[in-house]
Amino acid sequence: MFGEDISFLRDEHDEVRIIDMIMRIILFMKKNLVTNVRIYKKQSRKVVIHSATLRLCDSATLDVLIALHACNTATDDAIIKGIESGAKLIICAPCCHKQIRQEMEKSKVVDPITRYGIFLERQAVMITDAIRALIMEYYGYKTQVMEFIEMEHTPKNILLVGRKSEAPVDKEAILKQIEDLKKQYGIEKHYLEKIF
């Protein structure tokens, strides 16, 4: 079990402290081989991590949602759970990105980048996570995409971090960006769009 004070999450300008907390939680999870977690309040300002699956997770008690290497659309399910619960912080380290790659292959839309197999795979990863980040922003999360593990350890080292914000959101502009990306690469639908 791991406990962490989250009272500082109210301060939107404390980026360093938030990133530090995320790294400590991830290190704890890796050390203890925890892959799916539920984080909930205990005594108002403390979070406690217990191993759980999304199906067992009580959305009403979520303050922070973490999903490490949730394969394919499991990352999207975790993001949906976090958004629907109004989690203050959503942290995802996505894994396989099959859904968008399959959409791109099915559409047969080819450009100078995606005509090469390895580039198609990498582009599908970037598009998948870009749309995830945009959808999180649509729902009022200040979103960052960053690397969190050295490349020599794993090529799957992208971390999506969304912190709930009260700042106004231009939802129309975000939807247009999502539609433009999908049109450019022949994508019919991103799995996470089911939240709309």
Image (spheres, rainbow, N blue to C red):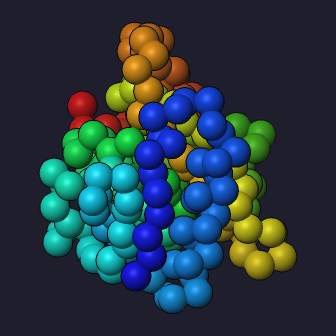
Where is the N terminus found, in terms of image quarters?
Answer: bottom left
Q: Is residue 109 visible?
A: no
Up-down relation of residue 128 to residue 11 (above or below):
below
Up-down relation of residue 41 to residue 137 (above or below):
below
Q: Is residue 15 visible?
A: yes
Q: Nearer the viewer, residue 100 or 76?
A: 76
Q: Nearer the viewer, residue 176 or 132?
A: 132
The residue at the far front in this view is: 43
105 left or right of 144? left
Q: Residue at x 72, y 75 (%)?
A: 154
Q: x, y percentage for residue 139?
A: 35, 29
Q: x, y percentage for residue 3?
A: 43, 70
36 left or right of 134? left
Where is the C terminus found, in terms of image quarters?
Answer: top left
Q: x, y percentage for residue 45?
A: 37, 53
Q: Nearer the viewer, residue 23 or 8?
A: 8
Up-down relation of residue 177 to residue 79 (above or below):
above
Q: Residue at x 51, y 42 (%)?
A: 8
- The image quadrant that residue 86 belongs to is top left
Q: x, y percentage for residue 64?
A: 38, 54
14 left or right of 73? right
